[in-house]
Image (tube, rainbow, N blue to C red):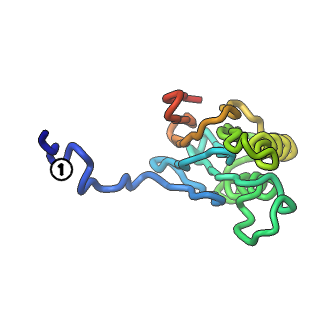
Amino acid sequence: MSVPPEEDIGIGCEPDPNRVEVGMGELRAAKYPDYLMTPALGSCVGVAVYDRLLRQGALAHIMLPRPSDTVMNGAESRFASIAVDRLVEELVARGSLRRRLVAKIAGGAAMFASDASFSAIGKRNAEEVRERLALARVPLIAEDVGGSHARTVELHLDSGEFVVRSYLYGIKRL
C-alpha cells in the first residue's frame, strides 16, 4: 500500500483566507468575499443573520438559552437571550437596515438522550433563538433543527446560502 502524495492528503495546504471561523459560544460578523463557519453543532444552535443588499452577515454559536441555565462563567455570546440581539446590533452598526435582515438556524439536536436533564437542551436552545428573533423582528426564513446528529454550518455572504453539513445526512443548502 502506497502513501498518497502530500497534495492529495492536504499536508501543507493553506487555510482558506476568506473563512471566518466562529467557535463555541462566539459570534462574528463579516462581509463578502468572506464567509462564516461554525463546526460541531450538537445541542448548540448556529444562528445566521444576513443582509442581502450589503452581502454581509453574522453568525453565533449558541450553547444555552439564558444565563440562568448555568452557574459557570464564560462569554455572554453563548446565550441565545443575549447573542441574537448582538448579531442584529453588529449588522446595524455595519450599515444594515433592520428591515433587510433575515435569519437561518441549524442545530438544536438531542445529543444527550440518555441523560434526561440534558436531553431537551437542544430543543430549548432552538425555541429561545426563535423567540429572540421574533422579538427582534428578524424573520426566520429557514431552519434545520432537531434530530440527534451534529452539524457544521457555513453562511455564504455572496448569496446568503446557509450550508448545513452532517455526517449522516450529507449537505443541505438553505
> What residue is shown at x 51% (from left), y 55% (from top)?
21
Provide residue 116's location: percent of width, then percent of height.
80, 44
Answer above or below: position of 162 versus 49.
above
Q: Nearer the viewer, residue 7 or 34?
A: 7
Q: Which residue is mark 1?
A: 6
Instruction: Report helix, strand or loop for mark 1.
Output: helix
Q: Nearer the viewer, residue 80 or 17?
A: 80
Provide residue 78's location: percent of width, then percent of height.
71, 59
> What residue is shown at x 70% (from left), y 67% (from top)?
75
Provide residue 33's location: percent of width, then percent of height.
45, 48
Count of numbered circles on the image: 1
Q: Quadrant of the N terminus?
A: top left
Q: In the image, what residue type sits under mark 1?
A: Glu
**Residue farthest toward the bottom in the current orientation of the protein:** 73
**Is residue 114 left or right of 58 when viewed as pictured?**
right
Q: Quadrant of the C terminus?
A: top right
